[in-house]
C-alpha cells in the first residue's frame, strides 16, 4: 500500500506517459547519465520525458531557452509554432538564432538547431500564425503547452484552447527587468482568465518591441517554464499551479502571489459562456493602425530638397530620439501630444514620424481630428528613412 502511494503519479502530472513507448537507446543512456542517477528522474522519468509531447508557442525570447533545454533534457517530441522570420533585433535574447539566420524562418531554423542539440528529439515546426482556426488542431496532439507569446490575443487564445482540451499551460511574460511565470491548469487551479478576466485597454501595456526587454531576462524566465514543464512530465515536486511567480531582476527578488480559480470564469467556471474559440483580436480590441494621409521617405526627401518648408514632428520617446532622429525635427512624445498640441501651428506643413510609422499614424489621426489639415505620416518611420534615403542613420 505504502509503495503504491509513493510511486503513484500525482493528479496534476501528465498522465499516460508510462503506457507509451519511451524506449531509451544505448547512446541515450550515456547522454542522460546525470539524469538517470537522480532518484527523482531515473530510467522511469527519462522514459516519461522521451514519451512526452511538448508544444512551445513562439520561438523568441522565452521559446529559445525553454525549447533548447527541453530538447537537451530528452523531451521526445517538441512542437514549435512561429510564423515570424529572424530579425537582427531578436539576436540579443533569442539564443536559438545567430547572425546568419537573419531573414530565415524562425520555426524552421529553430527545428534545425534543436535537431543538432538532440537528434533523439522529434521536432515539429509549425510555420504559421496560431489562430482560432488551427489552435485546437495543433494543440490536440500535445501533452503540455508552453506559452512564449508576446501579445494578448495569442495568450487568451492559448489559454482558452488549453482549458477546452484539458491541458496544462506553462505561462510566462516578460518586460524590461520583470518576469512572471505560473502553470495554468483549469482542472486543478485557475486559468489565465481567472487571473486576467479582461485584456488591458489596447496600447496601455507596451510590448517588448515598444518598451524593451533586458536580453538576459527571458533566459531565466524561459527556464522556469522548462523546469515546470519537466516537473509536470516527471510528476515530481510542487508545480506552480495557483501560484504566480514574480521576478524582478533589478532587485533580484522573487515574489509569489496566490492566485485562485474564479468561480465565474467565463471559460473554466462551472457555467462557461465561452465554449468555443472566439475572435481574439476583436476581444483584445487590437487597434488597426488608422488610415491616414502619408508620405514615403523618398517623396518627402524630394520635397525637402526642392525647398518646401516642412515641420518634422518626432513622436517617439526622448531615449529613442537620442539613438537617431531626422535633422531639424521637433520632439513631442505621443503621450504628451494632447497637452502640447498648441506648440504646433495649424498653418504649417507637418510630417509626423516615429520608429516604424504606427505611433505616428495615431498622432497624425489625432492631429487631423484637432484641425491640422496639412499633416501627413512618414511611411516606415525613421527606420524607413534610413532604408530608403539615408543609410548612415542607425536602425534599432
Ligand atoms: Zn478560468
Image (cartoon, rainbow, N blue to C red):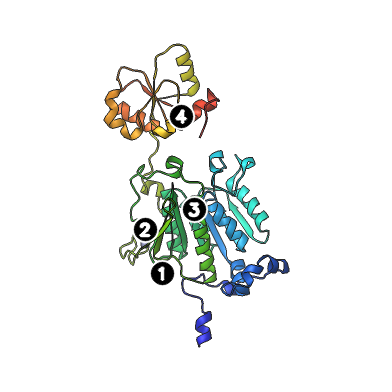
Mark 2 closeness class: few <14, some 14–19, many ≥20 residues within 10 Å: many
In space, the residues marked 1 and 3 are separated at their CA atoms by 22 Å
Residue lying at 58% horizontally and 58% vertically, measured from the top left: 69
For marks 4 and 2, give the one nearer the viewer: 4
Please give the residue where the numbered disc 2 appears in the rendered image: 193
**Mark sitting earlier along the chain (2/3):** 3
Mark 4 closeness class: few <14, some 14–19, many ≥20 residues within 10 Å: many
Please give the residue where the numbered disc 4 appears in the rendered image: 381
Q: Disc number at residue 148?
A: 3
Q: Quadrant of residue 190?
A: bottom left
The answer to whether mark 4 and mark 2 are in CB contact below 8 A is: no
- Can residue 371 be seen here? no
Please give the residue where the numbered disc 1 appears in the rendered image: 188
**Mark sitting earlier along the chain (4/2):** 2
Residue 113 position in % (x across, y down): 64, 51
In space, the residues marked 2 and 3 are separated at their CA atoms by 17 Å
**Mark sitting earlier along the chain (1/2):** 1
Q: Is mark 2 within 8 Å of ligand 1?
A: yes
**Mark sitting earlier along the chain (1/4):** 1
Residue lying at 59% horizontally and 70% vertically, measured from the top left: 48
Residue lying at 50% horizontally and 55% vertically, measured from the top left: 220
Amino acid at each position: 500500500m505504502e509503495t503504491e502511494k509513493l510511486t503513484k503519479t500525482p493528479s496534476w502530472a501528465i498522465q499516460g506517459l508510462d503506457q507509451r513507448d519511451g524506449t531509451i537507446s544505448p547512446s541515450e543512456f550515456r547522454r542522460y547519465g546525470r539524469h538517470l542517477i537522480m532518484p527523482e528522474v531515473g530510467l522511469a522519468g527519462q522514459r516519461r520525458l522521451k514519451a512526452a509531447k511538448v508544444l512551445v508557442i513562439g520561438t523568441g525570447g522565452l521559446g529559445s531557452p525553454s525549447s533548447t533545454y527541453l530538447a537537451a533534457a530528452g523531451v521526445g517530441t517538441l512542437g514549435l509554432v512561429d510564423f515570424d522570420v529572424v530579425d537582427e533585433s531578436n539576436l540579443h535574447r533569442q539564443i536559438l538564432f545567430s547572425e546568419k539566420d537573419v531573414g530565415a524562418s524562425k520555426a524552421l531554423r529553430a527545428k534545425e538547431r534543436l535537431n543538432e542539440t538532440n537528434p533523439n528529439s522529434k521536432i515539429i515546426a509549425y510555420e504559421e500564425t496560431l489562430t482560432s482556426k488551427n489552435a485546437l488542431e495543433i494543440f490536440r496532439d500535445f501533452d503540455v503547452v508552453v506559452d512564449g507569446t508576446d501579445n494578448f490575443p495569442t495568450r487568451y487564445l492559448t489559454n482558452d484552447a488549453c482549458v477546452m482540451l484539458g491541458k496544462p499551460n506553462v505561462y510566462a511574460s516578460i518586460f524590461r527587468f520583470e518576469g512572471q511565470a505560473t502553470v495554468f491548469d483549469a482542472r486543478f487551479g485557475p486559468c489565465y482568465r481567472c487571473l486576467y478576466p479582461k485584456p488591458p485597454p489596447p496600447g496601455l501595456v507596451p510590448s517588448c518591441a515598444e518598451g524593451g526587454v533586458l536580453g538576459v531576462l527571458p533566459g531565466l524566465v524561459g527556464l522556469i517554464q522548462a523546469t515546470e514543464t519537466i516537473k509536470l512530465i516527471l510528476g515530481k515536486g510542487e508545480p506552480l499551479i495557483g501560484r504566480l511567480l514574480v521576478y524582478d531582476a533589478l532587485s533580484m527578488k522573487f515574489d509569489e502571489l496566490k492566485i485562485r480559480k474564479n468561480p465565474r470564469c467565463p471559460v473554466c467556471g462551472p457555467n462557461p459562456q465561452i465554449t468555443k474559440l472566439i475572435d481574439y483580436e476583436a476581444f483584445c480590441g487590437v487597434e488597426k493602425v488608422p488610415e491616414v494621409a502619408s508620405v514615403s521617405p523618398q517623396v518627402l526627401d524630394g520635397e525637402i530638397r526642392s525647398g518646401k518648408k516642412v515641420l518634422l514632428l518626432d513622436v517617439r520617446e526622448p531615449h529613442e530620439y537620442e539613438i537617431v532622429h531626422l535633422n531639424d525635427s521637433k520632439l513631442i512624445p505621443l503621450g504628451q501630444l494632447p497637452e502640447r498640441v498648441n506648440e504646433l501651428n495649424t498653418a504649417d506643413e507637418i510630417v509626423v514620424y516615429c520608429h516604424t510609422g504606427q505611433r505616428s499614424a495615431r498622432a497624425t489621426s489625432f492631429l487631423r481630428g484637432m484641425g491640422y489639415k496639412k499633416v501627413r505620416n512618414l511611411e516606415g518611420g525613421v527606420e524607413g528613412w534610413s532604408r530608403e534615403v539615408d543609410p548612415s542613420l542607425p536602425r534599432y
